[in-house]
Every structure is written in C-alpha cells, then in structure tokens.
Amino acid sequence: MTAKPLTGIRVLTLEQFGAGPYGTMFLAELGAEVIKIEAPEGDPSRHVGPYKLGPADSEYFQAWNLGKKSVTLDIKSADGRRQFEALVRTADCVVNNLRGTQPARLGIDYASLGPLKPSIVCLHISAYGRANERADWPGYDFLMQAEAGLMELTGDPEGAPTRVGVSLIDSMSGLTGIVGLLSCLLRARTTGQGCDVETCLYDVAMHQLTYPGVWYLNEGDVSPRVPRSAHLSLAPVQTFPTKDGWIFIMCMTQKFWLSLAKAMDREELLGDARFVDPNSRAVHRAALTEALDPTFRTRTTDEWLATFNGLLPAAPVHRLDQALDSSFARATGMVSTVPHPAKGKLRVLANPIRIDGERPAQAACAPLGADNDSLFNESDSPLNENDSLLGKRT
C-alpha cells in the first residue's frame, strides 16, 4: 500500500488500557502519525503481564497500541505544558480516555486548545460522560457489560450472568469515538472549525442492546438468556453437539431451515406444525433441539461443515488456539508479524480493514519515550508557511 488514507494526519493521544488505544491504533495503521503522550512510568498497560517484552512493554500493551510513537511528558508542569502546546499547534486532533472532568482540568478540551489552533478536534472517551453525576467515576468494560444488562443476556439460563470473553465494549467505544473524530476532522478540513466530540463506555454498552432494547422500550418484553447461545426469536440459530465438538447453525431464513432438514435427511420435521416457521420453531426450541441433537452427534464438525457448505450458514465452535491456528485464518492473513526490538518477531492480529484488497502494514508501538528527542526538537521550531490548516505534515 503506497499511500495510506490517513497519511499526513497527526494525532496526539493521552490514553491508557483499552478504549482509547484501540481506536487510535486504527488511526495509526491507516496512516496517521499517532503520538502517545505518556507519564514517565508509561501507560499502565505496558506493565500488564504475564508476557513482558522488557521493563516497560508487554504483549498486552502491544495488542492495543501498534504503530504509535511515544513521548513522555508531564503536562501539569510548566515545561511539559509548553512542549504539549507546541505539539498541539502541529496536530489535527487530541484524543483522551480520561475520567469525564479531567480533560477540562488538564486543559486538553477544545475550550483550552481551540485558542491555540481553531481547527483542532478533541475526542473524549470516558467511562460515563463529561457532564453528569458520574463524570468523575472510574469505569471499565466489564462494569458496563454488567450494568447495561449485557451479562444478563449472555450465558446459560441456569448459570451465572456471563460477560463476553474479551473487552468488547472497550473496542466498540474506541471505534465509536473514531467515527465521531473522523467526521469532525472532515468538517474541520472544510471549515477550519474544530470542536469537542465524545462518547463513553456506558453509552456504547447501552447502545449494544439493539433490538432487545427496542422490544423492551416498546413492548415491555424483557429478553431472557436462552440455552445454547440461541437467537432470541429465530430457530434453529444455536449450537449443536457433534461427534467431536460443537457447531453453530444459523437458519435465519426459511430457506436455510429447509436446506438444513434436507441435508440432515430429516425432512419429516418439515411437516411438524411446531416447526413450520422461524417464530414457531423459536417457541418450540427445546423440542427442536431434542429432535436434532441425536442426528448432529452422528458426524464430526468437519463432516457437517462439508455437508452444509454452500447450503446454509454454519461455523465450528473453536477454542482460541483452534481459531488462530486454523487454515482459514492463515489463508486470509488475519495473523501477521511485526519487528520488535526485544522479541525480534512479534506475531499480532492483522488489521481487519482492506484497501484495494490489501491490509495496512503494521509496526510495533515505540518504546516508552523513544520519540522525545525528535518530536520535542521539532515542536521547538516555529511553524512555517507550508504548515497546513490541519497541522504540520510529516
């Protein structure tokens, strides 16, 4: 990829752990120069084990921060503030994922930075927002899954409420924030007017309630947890046990149900009034599961996938290692390798975006403070007439 789409955009980010870093990692991999401004001890996630890559680096940290530069800076000090403001004058946007009231206190919101550069866009990703009774509350992904009702929609009905196995709300909040940021950057490019743009983990978690949320708001329907990770209103859309594992079947349409029954040589089920349409099958899901389970157990997952190929949506239920080591993951290039000063070669997850069929090239995040000299020397130099409306181009 000769020219990434965000080449020439400079992003300053004051961030830690998940939501902010995940979003700005996309900016970096799409070509933006993302400068991670860290305290002298670094982003706390640099120190998260168990797999360390040196005194201030870890595989956990790199998973959220690929492609970024790093400077260490105390913006509360006079010298640190001067250096920060010099960088702001060369930047297009400033990102943070601090508690809601902190950006104003630290002077990293638009009210503080707009006078330095009117086109600057300030993205705020907090736990609960910047202007409510919880603005100063700390908050993390798993708490949002709990409070937004997502844990009560996840897991077996007879078990405990269950969170998603990864920090999905962090990732979604980061990407939601980046959508807002890029939208405002487009406007700033046209008008020269920057702004504050924000989102928060709580709002994003609530937004993930989607149709169960709309059902409750309009019909008073409180969606329950259902067995086998099944869909709330369509069937069969769930897991089934095979001879050697599990398979997930998604008969989202009547056509797929007809194909499933025929492929399994269970066409007698098509005449059963309980299974005549998707909603009826959902009402009688337990009976349908009992009818299909013995047949699914007669073949391996791979054998069923071969049978269903091209007929209906189905997927194996993988463990983490099976997912990453699968031939399809290798064939699609979802695992890549970046050079790393301590590890040599660090295997990472590839960017899921393709541009003209090609995934963006990746790099490890710089060591803590590695870019101090080059960036602070640059920021001490006066801007010149070639510096554009949206910042000094690199």
Image (cartoon, rainbow, N blue to C red):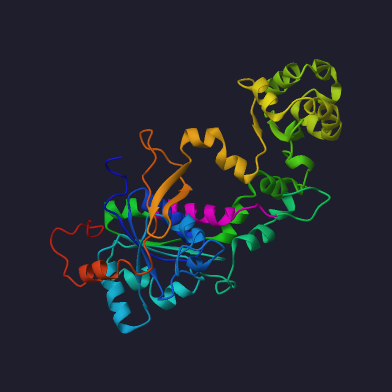
Task: Report the span colored magenta.
Answer: 163-183
Q: Residue furthest bottom?
A: 78
Q: Nearer the viewer, residue 221 or 328?
A: 328
Total number of numbered discs in the rendering: 0
Query: Residue 79, image x and y in percent?
Result: 29, 81
Q: Which quadrant holds the N terminus?
A: top left
- Does 113 sit left or right of 283 as displayed? left
**Which residue: 28% across, 68% down?**
87
- Does 251 sit left or right of 345 as displayed? right
Q: Residue furthest left?
A: 385
Q: Is residue 53 above or below residue 135?
A: above
**Residue 164 is covered by the magenta coloring:** yes
**Residue 328 is covered by the magenta coloring:** no
Q: Nearer the viewer, residue 144 or 325?
A: 325
**Which residue: 23% across, 69% down?**
379
Query: Residue 390, image x and y in percent?
Result: 26, 57
Residue 109 visible, this angle: no
**Which residue: 74% across, 33% down?**
244
Query: Residue 355, image x and y in percent?
Result: 37, 37
Residue 240 visible, this angle: yes
Q: Is residue 208 above or below residue 234?
A: below
**Which residue: 29% across, 54% down?**
9
Dividing the picture into quarters, in which one does residue 354 lie? top left
Dividing the picture into quarters, in which one does residue 234 lie? top right
Query: Residue 322, image x and y in percent?
Result: 61, 40
Q: Nearer the viewer, residue 173 or 129?
A: 173
Q: Which quadrant holds the C terminus?
A: bottom left
Q: Is residue 267 above or below residue 278?
A: above
